[in-house]
């Protein structure tokens, strides 16, 4: 086991010069799950490129991850190669340069990992995932932002939020995109029909804040004749949808995008959502709500149409406009593709991500023991306050 330095900045400087205990950085990503999701894909895309930069990656989970669980992602090909998959029990005697919480629930397990520094990769303000009446749970999630560990985020609004509410100087790095998969030159499942609008709805059907049923209802109200659904939910057919595609591996998702003209993504909460950007790369446009993070790349009436959050009638109006104005659709598509061409790929982004994580690690002001005390106390308090509820928080 490596010796622990009192001065984190000194430790990282030594590693950068190749004079530390190890010549290679050892990163640990704490994962709550590995099912299909945009946030999980972001972490996997980063991890796949870290090895090329001289970084060893270990994914840590409660239960052992089997290879077939990640068959939806390119990381499947590197499962037993350059990336390690271990449980918390299996890393008890290991030591990492940095341990990274990737979701609020994993924050409360950071103390279980031996590391020189602790950081938090924040992809959204996750208390917003839960209904407003779940006050105790939302407060419990927000508690994870209090300790002064280093933070990296993918959205400007999150950086500003954490600075204003928790005094965090978070590192900001835009997500990249896999341009090998997402481009306008590959195959499509079915050719687009000139003059006939084909709409894609994307997202899990059973997560309220993703609002997939609302998007489908808007298409029905606008009398859209050709509606496709791309979902990670276990459904084969869905009401008022012409075609349903579920749990596709990521290398096949672009075939769906290239077949459709517009993606209607009406989430109520996002960090920096990826599907509209992926759609841009594949030659389509988007209709979205003006939620936090949309302005990272979406511009109203330039590459997309943006409605106020919850304004279903405005979405219906936009759909009717696109249906009746093929020239408008084409203009938005052209501009969306120009936006996509300027967006960085993962190879460019991961270099910035490494530097951001190094900076975040140097900002960590909390020890493993302090994290343990904070986590145990906060979890215990929450569970005592909610003993009457079934299932608790896990």
Image (tube, helix red, strand yellow):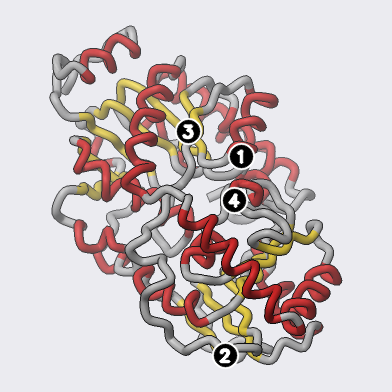
Q: Mark 1 or mark 2, which is nearer the start of the sequence?
A: 1
Query: Where is residue 223 shown, x and y percent of the image?
Result: 77, 88
In the visual, does 110 lie left or right of 309?
left
Mark 2 highlights which residue?
A: 193
Which one is in front, 332 or 277? 332
- What is the distance, in whole Å, between disc 2 and disc 1 at their CAs? 46 Å
Give the label, 4 or 1, closer to the camera: 4
The residue depicted at 68 percent of the width and 59 percent of the height is 302
Of marks 2 and 1, the one in the foreground: 2
Q: Is residue 233 left or right of residue 33?
A: right
The tag earlier along the polypeptide, 4 or 3, is: 3
Please report contact status of discs 2 and 1: CB closer than 8 Å, yes or no: no
Q: Secondary structure at mark 2?
A: loop
**Mark 2 surroundings within 10 Å by alpha-carbon count, few (fewer than 14), some (14 through 19), many (20 or more):** few
Give above or below for 37 relative to 3. below
Q: Secondary structure at mark 4?
A: loop
Q: Which mark is residue 338?
A: none
Q: Which residue is mark 4?
A: 297
Q: Which residue is under mark 1?
A: 141
Circle 3 residues within 10 Å: few <14, some 14–19, many ≥20: many
Which secondary structure lies at badge 1?
helix
Residue 272: x and y, percent?
57, 49
Q: CA distance from mark 2 to mark 4?
A: 27 Å
Mark positioned earlier in the residue sequence (4 or 1): 1
Q: Quadrant of the N terminus?
A: top left
Graded by Cα atoms within 10 Å as few (under 14), some (14 to 19) or many (20 or more), the crowding at tag 1 reads many
Give how far apart the Cα atoms at labels 4 and 1 are: 28 Å
Give the residue at mark 3. 152
Q: What is the CA distance from the residue labelled 3 to the residue labelled 2?
A: 42 Å
């Amino acid at each position: 086991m490596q010796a622990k330095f009192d001065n984190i900045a000194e430790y990282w400087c030594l590693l950068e010069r190749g004079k530390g205990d190890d010549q290679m950085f050892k990163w640990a990503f704490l994962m709550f799950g590995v099912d299909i999701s945009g946030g999980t894909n972001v972490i996997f895309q980063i991890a796949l490129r870290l090895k090329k930069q001289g970084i060893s990656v270990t994914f840590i989970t409660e239960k052992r991850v089997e290879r077939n669980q990640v068959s939806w992602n390119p990381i499947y090909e590197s499962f037993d190669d350059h990336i390690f998959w271990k449980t918390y029990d299996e890393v008890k005697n290991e030591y990492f340069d940095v341990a990274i919480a990737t979701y609020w629930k994993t924050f409360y397990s950071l103390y279980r990992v031996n590391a020189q520094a602790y950081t938090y990769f924040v992809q959204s303000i996750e208390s917003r995932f839960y209904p407003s009446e779940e006050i105790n749970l939302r407060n419990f999630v927000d508690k994870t932002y209090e300790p002064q560990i280093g933070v990296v985020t993918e959205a400007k609004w999150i950086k500003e939020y954490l600075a204003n509410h928790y005094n965090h100087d978070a590192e900001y790095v835009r997500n990249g995109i896999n341009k090998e998969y997402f481009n306008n030159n590959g195959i499509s499942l079915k050719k687009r029909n000139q003059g006939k609008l084909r709409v894609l709805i994307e997202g899990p059907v059973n997560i309220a804040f993703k609002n997939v049923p609302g998007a489908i209802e808007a298409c029905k109200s606008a009398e859209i004749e050709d509606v496709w659904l791309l979902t990670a939910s276990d459904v084969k057919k869905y009401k008022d949808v012409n075609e349903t595609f579920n749990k596709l591996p990521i290398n096949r998702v672009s075939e769906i995008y290239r077949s459709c003209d517009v993606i209607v993504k009406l989430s109520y909460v996002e960090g920096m959502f990826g599907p509209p950007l992926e759609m841009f790369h594949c030659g389509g446009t988007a209709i979205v709500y003006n939620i936090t993070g949309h302005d990272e790349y979406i511009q109203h009436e330039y590459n997309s149409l943006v409605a106020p959050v919850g304004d279903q009638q405005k979405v219906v109006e936009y759909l009717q406009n696109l249906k009746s104005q093929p020239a408008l659709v084409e203009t938005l598509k052209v501009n969306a593709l120009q936006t996509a061409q300027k967006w960085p790929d993962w190879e460019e982004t991961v270099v910035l991500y490494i530097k951001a994580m190094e900076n975040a690690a140097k900002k960590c002001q909390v020890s493993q023991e302090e994290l343990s005390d904070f986590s145990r106390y906060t979890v215990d308090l929450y569970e005592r306050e909610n003993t009457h509820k079934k299932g608790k928080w896990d």
